[in-house]
Image (tube, rainbow, N blue to C red):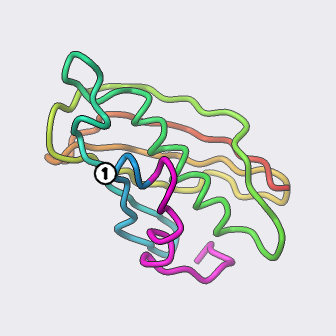
Amino acid sequence: MIWRRAATLAALNENSQGNMVAYLGIRYVHLGDDTLEATMPVDHRTRQPFGLLHGGASVVLAETLGSVAGWLCTEGEQQVVGLEVNANHVRSAREGEVRGVCRALHVGRRHQVWQIDISDSQGRLCCTARLTTAVL
């Protein structure tokens, strides 16, 4: 297990209240030994004007997952901030929900690199993102 902090899905979801994460309907759904997963609806909050999932909403999901996973890998007063995010949008989604799966590529003392794959309800890859974070 890579996590250094004790957390539950209920606690992660509670911590998301009152900010962008809750507004977009992002819900943490799985905390594995080395993965963190969340879903996000494809609806009026997350679609662009042409009816497709907004690429920015996918990036919010990716950065949310990577930042929280990064924080789970720290201890005490340490904090995690994003340094760079890159996303490739490979398939559109119009309805249902998408699921992001976050995995560590590197967890170091000063920085981390996270891979986040976002798939549609049929399991087809919609977006693949990489987030680099700094540990403060």
Residue at the disc numbered 1? 99
Any magenta on residue 2? yes
Any magenta on residue 30? no
Number of numbered discs visible in the structure rendering: 1
- Residue found at the far front of this picture: 18
Q: Amino acid at mark 1?
A: Arg
63 left or right, relative to 118: right
The residue located at (40%, 36%) in the rendering is 58
- Residue found at the far top of this picture: 50
Where residue 59 sits: x, y (%)? 47, 35
The residue located at (38%, 58%) in the rendering is 38
The stretch of residues the image draws in magenta is 1-21
Vertical placement of residue 8 versus 88, above or below = below
Vertical placement of residue 122 versus 74, above or below = above
Closest to the observer, 105 or 64: 64
Q: Residues within 10 Å of mark 1 (few under 14, many from 20)?
A: many
Closest to the observer, 27 or 20: 20
Q: Quadrant of the C terminus?
A: bottom right
Where residue 63 sits: x, y (%)? 55, 44
Vertical placement of residue 54 versus 10, above or below = above
Q: Quadrant of the N terminus?
A: bottom right
Vertical placement of residue 1 versus 113, above or below = below
80 left or right, relative to 58: right
Where residue 34 sits: x, y (%)? 52, 68
The residue located at (28%, 38%) in the rendering is 125
Closest to the observer, 30 or 1: 30
Of helix, strand and loop, which one carries label 1? strand
